Image (tube, grey):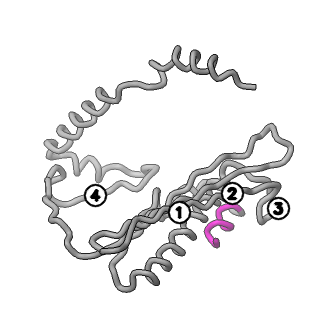
Amino acid sequence: MLDRLKLVIELHKVAGQLFTDPGPSYHLAQDIWRLICKDQTFLCKVRQVHNAPWPVPLWQNDLGAIIPIQKIEQQYVALSVDGSQIYPDRHNILSCCLINTGSVVVPYNIPGKRVQLFSEPTVFAGVDDYNQPFTTDSLNCKRQELELRAGLELAQQVKNEYGDVPAILFFDGSLIFWHLSSKEIGLRDQFLDA
């Protein structure tokens, strides 16, 4: 049984280490951004990067340009899907894990419509669809699969409910599955097919 009073005392002892002031990091990032924006050779330096472990973006015009955004008066719907997971406990005999897929629908300038929140928890126990125990990698892939499926279903639901009102769907992460390139061929193919 967990003694909560003792836990609070222990957390209080380490609170200074757990909860730090992000101010200095924020100011450092701002200072570096200003230096990059002033550096006329920065784009050339970026173009010289080869074999980067992630896609390196390129741009045109002034990197530090501030572009005013006009208020959007038309109707539209913003959708978002994100997932979280609890990994299998390696000390348990039976592999058990959880994926929660959360989503939100936010209608803008649409009278009578309200924000909708959804949560879809899925518990997995034993082995996956391919008779393999769940691992951190396979659960991450399954979470991304469930996020994409939920996004598709949500977009179809919004299309049915809102008709021709423009909609945009946001995902956390890349739609290019870079993380699968380093995985085993079977795992990679399983999730690319899904």
Quarter-of-image position of residue 89 = top right
Residue 185 coordinates in the image, percent (x, y): 68, 62
Gap in Å between the C-alphas at discs 1 and 2?
A: 33 Å
Query: x%, y% of residue 24?
Result: 29, 26
Give the residue at mark 4: 58
Residue at point 64%, 60% (across, down): 142
Give the spatial CA distance, label 2 vs label 4. 31 Å
Disc 1 versus disc 4: nearer the observer: 1
Q: Label 4 near label 1: C-beta < 8 Å?
A: no
Label 4 and label 3: CA atoms lie apart by 43 Å
The foreground one among 178 and 18 is 18
- Residue at 13 percent across and 42 percent down: it is 38
Give the mark, 4 or 3, whose residue is nearer the N terminus.
4
Residue assigned mark 3? 131
- Earlier residue among tags 1 and 2: 1
**Is residue 145 toward the left or the right of residue 110 in the image?**
right
Q: Position of residue 3 (x, y in %)?
A: 69, 21
| Magenta segment boundaries in residue numbering | 187-194
Name the residue type under label 3: Asn
- Point out the residue furthest to the front here: 112
Q: Earlier in the sequence, mark 2 or mark 3?
A: 3
Residue that badge 1 annotates: 118
Pointer 2 local density, CA inside 10 Å: few below 14, some 14–19, many at least 20: few
Assign a secondary structure to mark 2.
Answer: loop
